[in-house]
Image: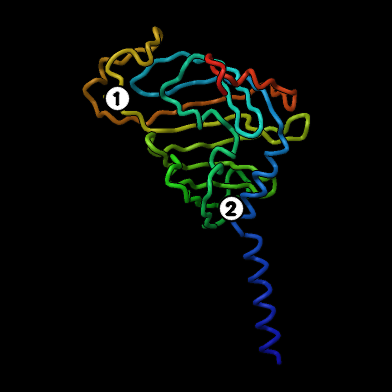
Amino acid sequence: MIYRILHLVILFVTLGFSQQKNPETILDDVKKEFEKIEDYQVDVKIKVDVEFLKMPEREATIFYKKPDKFHIDSENFALLPKSGLNSSPLGFLNYDYKAYYIREDTINGSITSVIKVIPLEISADVILSTLWVDTQRNIILKVESTRKPQGTFFINMDYIKTKQGFWLPSSMIFSFTVDRSLYPGKLNKDKDSELSKAKQDSDEKETGYVYLTYLNYKVNIGLSDELFEDKNGQK
């Protein structure tokens, strides 16, 4: 009798732990939390740090509207995939996928659940993503993602709580690999960008960093769909 009771206790504890660590539930909670946001507008300061590149800090304004409209008002940044500027977690979860709980980890004092996400759709440009999820606030603190054709990049995020009570990024560090051979001259035709002559004969692969600082969030302000239309009037 004692053995059977002990077995049931262990079973219930195991089931409870599994439910708490269910990766599908964790990611669904992240999506549900972000879906409370209808739209937002935010100013962002952008600092690009690539060893062979000199580029001044830039500023941009980012616009988002539910469910997946995204617009950047700034000069073009060829080095940075749009997924890096888009702070929406739905960008990593907007396809059919299989999720796996890996382990528990701590980031800056916050306990996170580490989850690997593998797309089930052949057309998805994501090969594999690893997400560090703060399950207390239902936000993603860190991302490692391998995409076609950009390769693997990493994102680390800090958050701020807006006046409306939403947790949105206050800063983001985006790291990625740059192929120097693709930029033999002026990068992106930017007159302020130039290659360092002393580094032209070094290795072609460089690790680049982009530092983003988000300021002046305006949330749920009723952004117009026209803002997200291209020059041809298509969304």
In this rendering, the answer to whether 91 lies above or below 20 is above
- Residue at figure coordinates x 68%, y 83% from the top left: 6
Taking the image as shown, residue 8 lies to the left or right of residue 93, namely right
Quadrant containing the N terminus is bottom right
- Number of other residues with Cα within 10 Å of mark 2, as a class: few under 14, some 14 to 19, many 20 or more: many
Give the spatial CA distance, label 1 vs label 2.
36 Å
Disc number for residue 113: 2
- Where residue 147 appears, as percent x and y from the top left, is 42, 39
Front residue (pair 22, 162):
22
Query: Which quadrant would the C terminus be assigned to in this image?
Result: top right
Q: Disc 1 or 2, which lies upstream in sequence?
A: 2
* Residue 135 screen position, x and y as percent: 66, 50
Residue lying at the far right of the rendered structure = 164
- Horizontal and vertical percent for residue 184? 27, 18
For image coordinates 29% across by 14% down, the residue present is 185
Label 1: how many Cα within 10 Å (few below 14, some 14–19, many 20+)? some
| Left-right relation of 125 to 222 | left
Is the residue 47 above or below the residue 115 in the image? above
**Residue 180: numbered disc:** 1
Image coordinates of residue 43 in percent, x first then y, are 63, 19
Amino acid identity at mark 1: Arg
Q: Is residue 190 above or below residue 40?
A: above
Callout 2: SS: strand
Number of numbered markers: 2
Identify the residue shown where x is 51% and y is 57%.
102
Residue at the location (53% across, 49% down)? 96
